[in-house]
Amino acid sequence: MTQDNQFYNHKKIDIKWQKKWEKTQIYTASNTSKKPKQYVLSMFPYPSGAGLHVGHPRGYIAADVYARLKRMQGFNVLHPMGYDAFGLPAEQYAIQNKVHPREAVLKNVKTFEKQLEIIGLSYDSSRKINTTDEDYYKWTQWIFLKLYNHYYDHKAKKAKPISDIEGKFKHLSQSDRDKELMKYRLAYEGYSEVNWCPELGTVLANDEIIDGKSERGGYPVEKKLMRQWFLRITDYADRLITGLDDVDFDESIKTIQKNWIGKSFGHELEFEVKNDQGFDFVIDKGIKIFTTRIDTLSGVTFLAISKDHDLLKNNEDKFSKIINQTKSWSADENDIKIKKGILLEGIHAVHIDNKSKLPIYVTNYVLSDYGHGAVMGVPDQDERDNDFASLYGINIKETKIESPEIIEKRLKLKKVYKYKMRDAVFARQRYWGEPIPLKHDKDGHIIELKEKELPLKLPKVSSYEPIGNGESPLAGISSWVKAGYETNTMPGWAGSSWYFLRYMDAHCKTGLASTKSIDYWRQVDMYVGGREHATGHLLYSRFWNKFLYDIGIAKTDEPFKALRNQGMILGNDNQKMSKRWGNVVNPDDCIKVYGADAFRMYEMFLGPFDSSLPWSTDGIIGTRRFIDRFWRLAQVIKTQNKNNKNIKTDNNLVSEINKTIKKVTEDIEGFAFNTAISSLMILLNNFEDDIQSGKNINQKDFIDFVKILTPFAPHVTDEIWSMFEVKGSVNISDWPKYDLKKILENKVRLGIQINGKLRGDIEIVPSKSEKEVIEEARQIVKNHLEGKVIKKTIYIKGKIISFVI
RNA sequence: GGGCAAGUGGCGGAAUUGGUAUACGCGCUAGUCUUAGGAACUAGUUCUUCACGGAUUGAGGGUUCGAGUCCCUCCUUGCCCACCA
């Protein structure tokens, strides 16, 4: 045997097949095929400058294995890949290196593509996308305008055109009408606090702040009110919860999303506020609170409001001292653990039920953006209220728990639902994002861009740094500002919230994808990606899809029918892979030494797909040996079959082959790749045993083995397939079917227990009668039974024989 | 503090879902081949015992003919959320 036949030459053969696949376009999906469809999608990457480490491809390989199985099973498979490239990292790279972010993106995409290419993933290369391409972000802007133009009809439970309710505000002046409508639009203008760093003169993302200081330079960071755009995701809160019932996601992901949305049921009350004797504060508004524990109403001894509460804002002159004091309460987390409060002297609230006087405190433990920014303090029942009351010497009254229904009736209260989730801020004061396609005219009215004016392209700027007042670099371009264009750009997650639809028809010029293509593909059947996107991307894309469904673009309410999450690959030292720890392993190096197939198999063999595992390059040698042994086996079988096509494979091996077909099929479908590979290894051991003991193997039986290995090791299997002079590619051949009868004909070994302890075993054909089996078993363990009476005999077919004495 | 996972050889892990625990792979040991080392191949490898045997799935208890798997108590580790009224 030549050296070439001893070892699989991955350097030559891997590239040969990767080129051939690309040339013959065997992985290109059809938008009109009559075959059943299967849309298998990996979450697309953000191409960072660092490139891939061995953790990244895990999800891609898994999705690829699944896609390859589905393709061989006869499905028309859509398996695309693209890049999500707007956002902070590219912008920062551009600032540091004084290049256009687009250049950085193109460079990084190239690196990623090269790294992915050598893994041998079966992507449809005709459907590549990049969220920063103008003909892609044109449609991101288009969707934004649709959101701007729609409101949520809570009765109909769907989005409707804003024009439907314009009539209601006909009588108002234009600017008042604009204001009213803004309260309904799904994309709306508003204000929110941002992290402002005066020293750097920029707004910072949460990631850029460490311990309350800027990551760069360690300068202090404060809150600043900034004009923003928001998306009214809270309108979809209920549907985002109920939709989870219809999708096949891991329960933990569903729970994370439900907790994030945080729906809770309770009551709203308003406490009257009065002047204390001798004071002449005139406050006509009461304090509204939300509670989930109306049954504890009798225990209320104080009210607590947040430092941003309207009561303070509306009476700034009277409470100026207090307001100034609260400003020094830092947002530092450790600080929040210690409860602080200031009594509002001169006023008090009146208990809604028993009319007792309740002191009002401004506190640091009441959140301003949940409920009404105020709580009723029940120190007897609530731990937090108790902490606070103890610190400030507030009366703690024993609570008489009453039924909510009775209180509801007596005080005429309504049931309400509250959500923890906030509307999503949809604006960044940055350069590298999609421009928001709106103009402000000189009177301040907002004018939408028309579809034919899209895309609104990012203008050239001299610097990508925000201008000194915290606004986006776009605000520094006089022509842009003069034209009245919005200076905020969209956040990083805009483009990734609908990309799964674009793949259906990646080059469509008339819409985000043609109606026909969306009708055909409908939704993603299998989505694979990291668990860390549970409250970000995964929630946003479900929201956008639901909106697009409401307006008739998307064809299903949910974008992803099923989701599988990969666990993280850790470094050798059990820590997250990062340059910082020096534990990064590069996939290119592994592939260079061991080949793509050994690398792919090892990534899948490491352990359960959804658990985090430490990487150890030492282990790849195992799957590499497997590839070499498989390769040698192919040569032997080829020689055996050269002259005689009618040789017969041993029955035991035929049974093992069928068993393995069943196991591998079921395991890939269940994302249990590690056990699929171990069963393939066992099968190889069986083949080798037969060869070693001089038995013949028919090449047809071996070809079944080649096929079931293909999803994991598509290069070596295609080479072997061609060796047997079969036309085409094994990658688009038929997936073998197993014969249950052939599995059952084989002998099985059963254990024999006495009083639960194993005392022997027996090899039988499963079809043997119960009586015979038991009698045989009794003979085998008869020295353990001597002189004893068998009280009970248990025989579980195919599993165990158990005697009780 | 709350929620969710998970604890099995030297290591990664498997166990038909209550039925022969430690599959498969790494590593290790011995052998074959080699000037040597490596690679490759062959055999062995949970612990204990010369052996027969016995013990063993984080600890303890329970249900059962039978428990890694189910129930109770406790311990440990990881992840997510964290004053949500």
Image (cartoon, rainbow, N blue to C red):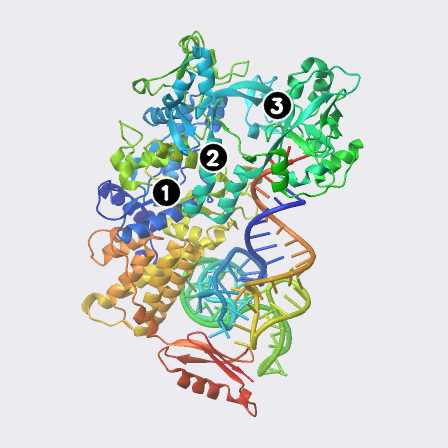
Crowding around mark 1 (Cα neighbors within 10 Å: few <14, some 14 to 19, many 20+) is many
Q: Are marks 1 and 2 on the same chain?
A: yes
Q: Do labels 3 and 1 share a chain?
A: yes
Crowding around mark 2 (Cα neighbors within 10 Å: few <14, some 14 to 19, many 20+) is few
Among the 4 quarters of the image, the one containing residue A402: top right
Residue A726 vertical position relative to residue A268 in the rendered view, above or below: below
Quarter of the N terminus of chain A within the rendering: bottom left
**Mark 3 / mark 2, whichever is N-terminal:** 2
Q: Residue A94, percent across and down?
A: 46, 23
Q: How far apart are marks 3 and 1 (CA)?
A: 40 Å
User: Are the residues at dot 3 and dot 2 in contact (C-beta closer than 8 Å)?
Assistant: no
Q: Residue A353, percent across and down?
A: 69, 33
Amino acid carrying label 2: it is Ala
Q: Distance between the residues labelled 3 and 2?
A: 23 Å
Amino acid carrying label 1: it is Leu
Mark 1 falls within which chain?
A: A
Residue at figure coordinates x 56%, y 39% from the top left = A264
Using the rendered image of the protein, determine whether residue A56 is visible from the camera's viewpoint: no
The residue that disc 3 covers is A217
